Every structure is written in C-alpha cells, then in structure tokens.
Image (spheres, helix red, strand yellow):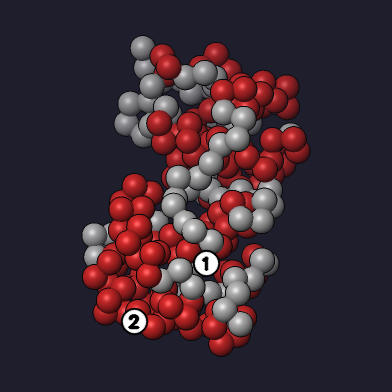
Amino acid sequence: MAKQLDYHTIHQIFTRFRNAEPEPKGELEHVNVYTLVVAVALSAQATDAGVNKATRALFQIADTPQKMLDLGEARLIEHIKTIGLYRNKAKNVIKLSRILVEEYGGKVPSSRAALQSLPGVGRKTANVVLNMWWHFPAQAVDTHIFRLGNRSGIAPGKDVDAVERAIEDNIPAEFQLHAHHWMILHGRYTCVARKPKCQACLIRDLCQFEDKTE
C-alpha cells in the first residue's frame, strides 16, 4: 500500500483527469433511475459490457418495477443468464421491484439508507445510483478504484470503506462529483491489474507505484 499523497499532488492528478475527460460517464446502459439500479445490481462480479449486452432487450420491455414483476423471474432469467450469479440476481431484482411498488409507489428512493435496504443493493450500488442519477458526490469503490487508490497513493486503505473515506477526505471538493468515474476508467483501461500501462499513464510521474512497467 502506497502512502497517502499530499493535497497538491492529488489536485494535479485530478486536474489532469479533468483536462483529459471533463465529463466522465459511467458505462452501464440505462433508460431511467430504476433501470440504473437494476443494471448496477446485476454488475456485481460481472463486466459492464456483459451487463449491457444482457439488459438492452430486457429494458425495452421492463423499464419499471411493475413491468419487471409482470415479466416474472423465469423470463427475467432468460434475459440475464449470461451474467454471473444470474439466478440469485434475478430473485433480488424481483424482490426489490416488489418493494419499490408496494412501499415506494414504484419510485426509486434517493437516500442511501433506503437504497441499501433493497435486496441486492449494497453501499457501492447505492453510491453509484446517488452519483450517476442524483449527482451526489458519492464514491462507489469497486476493484478498479481500490487498486488505483492503493497503488498510486490517491486513496490508500485496507478495505473498500477505508478507500471510500480516503477519497472523501483527500480529494478536493471540486473533483468529488466525478472522482469515482475518473478513477474507475483509469483503473479499467490504464492501471489494469496484471500489467498496468504505465507508459501511457497521464499521472505516471505523480504515482507512487514502485513496480511501474516500461
């Protein structure tokens, strides 16, 4: 684990991220906040590309909680069976859809606590929805952010909660809204797990990772 970078260095890093991509976007496809919740819940231990492939046809016919209930678990499974853990995820999607219909009038709540009370929705999923839909500066820490935060010194921590706190505590407020998207995209395409693309990295000179690739 790298040491926590200082404020000035972190400001330089995120200035570069912003200059390269002023408005970073999440890669999960959705048509409304409900389909965003479903897509993020389905993405656990799966790739965004794999989820998008499975949900394109699904969201054309089931883009509200009631439509998903009408579709039913068996037909939902047919749509998402290419995604890992699809049976359990299908159960959770049906359960969360029923709760949204019965307790929230078919609307997705905008509080983290309410979102996390839904089956299959953890803190990371809730934070993604809060950030992408309601533009709250919520930090969803996935494997890419955890790796980048610890390698670089941007936000080191022993677990995802510690990394989330480090992001909130150490990244300047002006970058908080887009911080997790910049970090996810950098971790997904440049600071990859096995052989990071350090030669192509726009923060190479500011990063504390000792085993940089040539």
Residue 158 is left or right of residue 166, and the answer is left
Question: Which residue type does callout 2 highlight?
Answer: Gly
Identity of the residue drawn at 61% across and 55% down? 133
CA gap between label 1 and label 2 equals: 16 Å
**Amino acid, disc 1:** Tyr
Q: Earlier in the sequence, mark 1 or mark 2?
A: 1
Task: Identify the residue at image location x=35%, y=57%.
Answer: 56
Q: Position of residue 99 (x, y in %)?
A: 53, 82
Is residue 149 at all visible to an observer of this figure? no
Q: What residue do we see at 75% from left, 38% from top?
A: 173
Looking at the rendered structure, the secondary structure element under dot 2 is: loop
Relative to 21, say whether 64 is above or below.
below
Residue 58 seen:
yes
* Image quadrant where residue 91 sits: bottom left
Image coordinates for residue 37, horizontal then vertical, percent = 50, 63
In this picture, is 75 found above or below 46?
below
Disc 2 crowd rating (10 Å Cα; few below 14, some 14-19, many 20+) is some
Callouts 1 and 2 close, C-beta under 8 Å: no
Residue carrying label 1: 34
Figure label count: 2
Determine the image quadrant of residue 203: top right
Residue 14: x and y in percent read 64, 27
Q: Residue at x 30, y 53 (%)?
A: 53
Residue sticking out furthest to the bottom: 102
Q: How many residues crowd mark 1 within 10 Å: few (<14), some (14–19), many (20+)?
A: many
Out of 119 and 101, give the one closest to the viewer: 101
Residue 72, numbered circle: 2
